[in-house]
Image: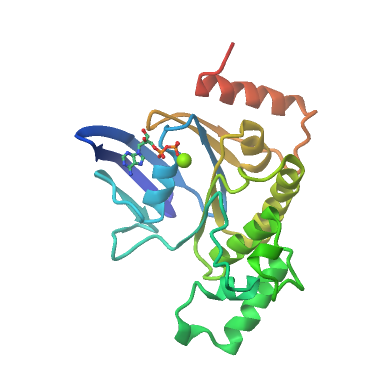
């Protein structure tokens, strides 16, 4: 039990073209304060649906979600910030303006500008206040997207394959950066990835979803950075791949 975020018996059924699909089936999960939860699973296993329910972008068909003991609903959503695979920046706004854009115009005070500037520092983009999205690399654009998610100081950051579109080296650098920011921000991070190595390098806990259900849960209790040469690392990779159903 936890009094942070709890999901109880969550099911989500989509109806499309006269067919029903259960994206999540009776899923129960407690999310701890300040954990880095990595969610892996095959395509279609319900990972995005889980994040969308946490973000209150989707209502579950059955089950309930609580935040610090209080029932969440469309009128009382979990305070969260979301990062997607593509940065989704407004192309006509600068990096700083994209971060401020999360707020309604009347709240865009000088103080907020100052906070946004600090946020750009946090995500490793000091000096890029005036840069336009077209001038930013993929990794830099994702840093802005993360800043936009963090600026409202939500309790949880939701990341849906945030590094999936980046090249290998940028991806590795961004993994380290995300861990640095996670350790600094002291929030819960929930990150979906289809990269098992990435999940185990970054997560303090890894869960495997399969057909909308939890197939496996692994606590990763060794500190960062986690070198690939560590035999524990390879063992956990095998365990996760087995749970996904990739064991040979
Ligand atoms: N808006 C939707 N309408 C109909 N079916 C959907 C919708 N969103 C997701 N699904 C279905 O729900 C299942 C889980 O999808 P999703 O949560 O996106 O999985 P993942 O992110 O793990 O790939 C899939 O079978 C998908 O086709
Ligand atoms: Mg998905």
Q: Nearer the viewer, residue 188 or 87?
A: 87
Outermost residue toward the top in this view: 248
Quick check: can you spot residue 1? Answer: no
Q: Position of residue 159 (x, y in %)?
A: 54, 50
Seen at 71% across and 50% down, the residue is 174
Q: Nearer the viewer, residue 52 or 93?
A: 93
Answer with left or right where residue 19 lies relative to residue 81.
left
Q: Position of residue 36 (x, y in %)?
A: 58, 47
Q: Quadrant of the N terminus?
A: top left
Q: Quadrant of residue 196?
A: top right
Q: Is residue 183 above or below residue 198?
A: below
Answer with left or right where residue 68 lies relative to residue 188.
left
Label count reads 0
Quick check: can you spot residue 74? Answer: yes
Q: Quadrant of residue 220?
A: top right
Seen at 44% across and 43% down, the residue is 48
Q: Quadrant of the C terminus?
A: top right
Seen at 73% across and 40% down, the residue is 168
Q: Quadrant of residue 145?
A: bottom right
Q: Is residue 55 above or below residue 248?
A: below
Q: Position of residue 224 (x, y in %)?
A: 74, 44
Q: Nearer the viewer, residue 105 or 223?
A: 105
Answer with left or right where residue 73 lies relative to residue 126.
left
Q: Is residue 28 above or below residue 96?
A: above
């Amino acid at each position: 039990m936890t009094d942070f975020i709890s999901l109880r018996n969550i099911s989500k059924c989509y109806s499309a073209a006269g067919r029903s699909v259960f994206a999540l089936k009776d899923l129960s999960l407690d999310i701890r304060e300040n954990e880095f939860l990595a969610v892996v699973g095959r395509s279609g296993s319900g990972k995005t649906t889980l994040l969308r329910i946490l973000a209150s972008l989707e209502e579950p068909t059955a089950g309930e979600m609580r935040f610090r003991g209080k029932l969440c609903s469309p009128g009382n959503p979990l305070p969260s910030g979301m990062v997607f695979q593509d940065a989704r920046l407004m192309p006509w706004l600068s990096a700083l303006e994209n971060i401020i854009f999360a707020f309604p115009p009347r709240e865009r005070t000088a103080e907020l500008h100052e906070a946004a500037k600090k946020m750009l520092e946090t995500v490793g983009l000091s000096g890029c206040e005036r840069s336009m999205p077209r001038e930013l690399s993929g990794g830099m654009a994702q840093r802005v997207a993360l800043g936009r998610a963090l600026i409202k100081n939500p309790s949880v950051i939701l990341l849906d394959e945030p590094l999936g579109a980046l090249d290998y080296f940028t991806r590795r650098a961004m993994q380290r950066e995300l861990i640095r920011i996670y350790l600094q921000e002291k929030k819960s991070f929930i990150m979906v990835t289809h990269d098992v190595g990435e999940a185990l390098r970054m997560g303090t806990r890894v869960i495997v979803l399969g057909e909308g259900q939890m197939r496996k849960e692994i606590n990763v209790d060794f500190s960062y950075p986690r070198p690939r040469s560590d035999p524990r690392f390879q063992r956990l990779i095998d365990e996760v791949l087995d749970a996904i159903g990739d064991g040979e």
